[in-house]
Image: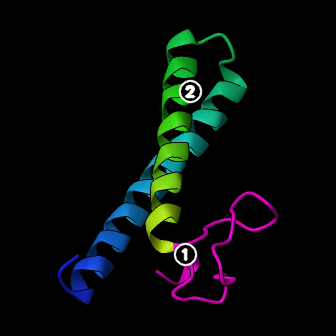
Amino acid sequence: MNNPSEGATQRYELMEKIQMVDFALVELTLYLDTHPNDSQAIQQFNELAVQSRDLKANYEKHFGPLRQYGASFSGYPWNWKDSPWPWQL
């Protein structure tokens, strides 16, 4: 990253992608609750779940932890205090 604003832009873009994929996962979950035999929807859900996992791993690699309670690891020193936190973006 050449300048701080470039890093902030990348952070926001990655967080937006995570939010879009996770929104689609929530919608597919609701759909699959009423259509549990839709194999195409299940396949799409599984593909998006992998994409969500990979996006979050990439975010955490570059910008720090996203999720509490053991779902995300901390760097050294403890970096949960670093901001902005994901919900502040």
Single out the residue that lies furthest toward the front. Answer: 76
| Side (left or right) of 3 relative to 22 | left
Relative horizontal placement of residue 86, taking residue 55 as reference (left or right)? right
Query: Relative to 74, is 49 above or below?
Result: above
The 10 Å Cα crowd at callout 1, few under 14, some 14 to 19, many 20 or more, is some
Residue density around tag 2, few if under 14, some if 14–19, many if 20 or more, within 10 Å = few
Query: In this view of the protein, which residue sits in the foreground, 6 or 2?
Result: 2
| C-alpha span from label 1 to label 2 | 24 Å
Q: Residue at x 53, y 35 (%)?
A: 50
Mark sitting on residue 46:
2
Q: Taking 24 as reference, is 70 above or below it?
A: below
Q: Main secondary structure of the magenta part?
A: loop
What span is in magenta? 64-89
Numbered tag placed on residue 27 in the rendering: none
- Residue 7 placement, left or right of 36: left
Is residue 32 magenta-colored? Answer: no
Q: The residue tagged with tag 1: helix, strand or loop?
A: helix
